[in-house]
Amino acid sequence: MIKVSHVSKSFSHGKNAVNDLSFEVQPGETLVLLGTSGCGKTTTLRMINRLLIPDQGEIFIQGKSISTETPETLRRNIGYVLQNTGLFPHYTVLENISVVPQLLQWDKTRIRSRALSLMEKLRLPPASYAYVYPQQLSGGQQQRVGLARALAADPPILLMDEPFGALDPLTRISVRKEFKLLDELNSKTIILVTHDVEEAFELGSRICIMNEGRIQQMGTATELLFNPANDFVRHFLDKQRLELELKSLRLRDIWPYLDGAGGMAGTILSADTNCWDTLENLTRDKASSSFRGEGKHLDGNILMNAITAYKKTVSQHGHA
Amino acid sequence: MDTPETFFDFVRQQSGKLLEQTLTHTGLTFISVLIAVCIGVPAGILISRRKKLAGPVLGITGILQTIPSIALLGFMIPLLGIGPKPAIVALFLYALLPVVRNTYTGILGVDPNITEAATGMGMSPRQLLLKVQLPLAMPVILAGIRTATVINVGVATLAAYIAAGGLGEFIFGGIALNNTHMMLAGAIPAALLAILFDWGLSRLQRLNMRKARKTVLVLPAVLLLLSSFYLLPDTYSTRLKAGFTPEFMGRKDGAIGLGNVYGLHLRTLVISDMIMYKAAYEKKLDVISGSSTDGRVKAFDLVVLKDDKHIFPPYYAAPVVRQALLEKYPELAPALDQLSGTINDSIMTELNYRVDYLKQNPQQVAKDFLVSARLWKPARNGTKGTIRIGAKIFGDGYILANMYKMLIEGHTDLNATTKTGLGGTKIVFDALVNDQIDMYPEYTGTGLLVILQAPQQTVDSIIGDSKKVYDYVKKGFAEQYQVRWLQPIGFNNTYALMMRREQASRLHISSISDLATYVHHH
């Protein structure tokens, strides 16, 4: 869907540079660019919708180099969500959401019905919010309007630059949850930039860890955690390692190492439940799970032992 | 014509003229602001995109702003003549800086997040400008237009100096004639206009925060409407065109007398004394109301028309001094009176010519004359006291004030300072009465008609006799203001109508009666 090929970009002030970057994003995938500030992740994002022009290399969308199109046409087909929302203060919520369809010259009734239906989906009841101005909304609501604006013309690609960065921690978590559940996003190819490790692991199908303008490692959550490519990746994740591991390992991943044969009791958990949620369950109640017709009962010891065994195998063989 | 009793009588009597001046004033203000917006906003947009140009453009408009308004109007005359054109151009130049600067800062002040969002959504640079930058910068741009408008309401009063009309006609006429009602009839509406426009634009500005896009359309419409008040007067005419000073326009011995006694009615523009002679020389005007001893009469080869029906009263110059001062320093009067009888009309014209046209230093001219009249003595640097000598802004005043300073310092142990350029009669006389100056040279006719405002019968009975006029003002000043008239200097700086010598001889006009006859038949 999106192919970034040997792209470099440098700035006179020396920061935010990108050095010989190459990666591909599959259709429907959410790729998270993760790194500290100044690592070049936002620069990368801004090159994809041509807000910046690469010094070297090329970017392709659906096999077509983006430099062959006018920037306006390109951008109108890419949803863009900014950290500080960038909502137009002189436009109402409805007008803000309608911006891109208007640029694409949709007819008025179509724009209106699209904008209203998006407001419904994003829990912004049009009756109360259609004609208010952005500054009258809370931060979480503003962010949802920003998302609605990016989705309005139903673009196949969505670029998100720290979309939850300006929210307080509690709002951030709840907006993120809603975001995950939004079916508008299911079919989209998304590139999301963040410096928040937890957010990256929660939202990304794959994660690309960047440092000093280069990709350090790109892969799924478990690949990054249990098979780090270098010390940078290892150290980068160290602080939250336990929580990340528990959240990214599902029962099915460690199934062979679970030593709790027979005896289904308490809450029955799906094998797709991650270890974090399983532990949380175990603090309240007995729990068990079944996978491929085999039932196992669970407790804290069984779970922890299985995780340890899993990690040992992975570090020895490179895979489970 | 009697002087109206109260301010409201004056306004009622002159309501037609007042309305016309107010409309002209409004039109002048807005037509220039409109042009400034049409040029300044695009210029501001341009420099917000090409930042290298910002410094030079803002610098140049800033320098234009620092040029004194009357000087800027003066610069316009050789380029654009007199009348509305140079006034509008000058006002436009004044309005330019606030409009350009505020457009520039307004656009740069738009949150970069918002412009990035707009670009990222796929807006073209033009859409970005029209849909986002201009609407969001609009309050700042409007503030600039507000500033420009208020500045221009003020500066537009000066347009009366170059025959462009407006409320300045009343203001400067009032100052020149010592007529407070007339002055206020110009000044109050001018102030009200400034307040009104400022308020109106502030309303528009507040309205705009929400309905930015509508304002963009409303504003030009409003500006256009207000500009249309100023219908450019027809500048082309075969008839003779007269330019009179504001003072001359309202005086019994000026334009009013010309109408009553000679039946002379010319197409008349109000114009500043400073540029009137040059405008006549450059054929922008045909008949002007000069003063007979002005150096520029000689410089620009003008000819004075004979006042064959004697409407211009005698204007013999003499020093007027505060009585108390003469008593305190008895040696002062004899020192000053030495000048009496030494300067006749042609000598005064010559002296003025040297100062006004040859640009010689008035001090030097004064000294040369005193030396040649054997009156000059080196300054004694006395410390007995200081005499403050005032003068009006006309050439006579500068030279005479300098002569008096030299006479006082050379012949007494007193010191003297000069405060020249005190505007018209009202300003300098008020300064004398309020003890801000001690003396200044005044004309008998001005004393009679402007300061004492003698009743019509009295004026009629004494006006033909210069000695009677002198005696009347001397008595009146002493009684009413404790100010004494010393001996007349000798020359008679009376009003005079004048024309270009070439035109006057071609049309066979040598007196005001000839002129009236000519105008009547053409």
Image (cartoon, coloured by chain):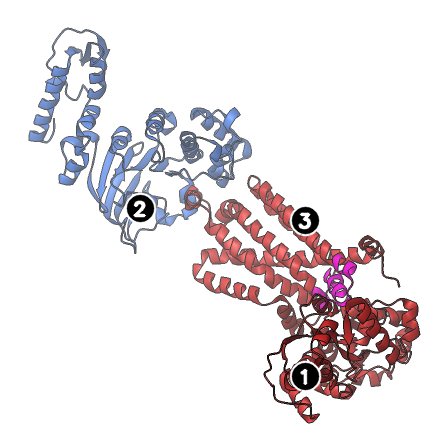
Q: Is residue A213 magenta?
A: no
Q: Which chain is red?
A: B
Check disc 3: other Cα within 10 Å, few if <14, some if 14-19, many if 20+: some
- Per the model, the C-alpha gap separating discs 3 and 2 is 51 Å
Q: Which mark is residue A43?
A: 2
Q: What amino acid does circle 2 point to?
A: Thr
The quarter holding residue B495 reads: bottom right
Q: Which residue is mark 3?
A: B196
Span of residues in magenta:
B159-184
- Per the model, the C-alpha gap separating discs 3 and 1 is 49 Å
Position of B230 with respect to A215 (left or right) is right
Q: What amino acid does circle 1 point to?
A: Met
Q: What amino acid does circle 3 point to?
A: Leu
The quarter holding residue B166 reads: bottom right
Q: Which chain is blue?
A: A
Chain hosting mark 2: A
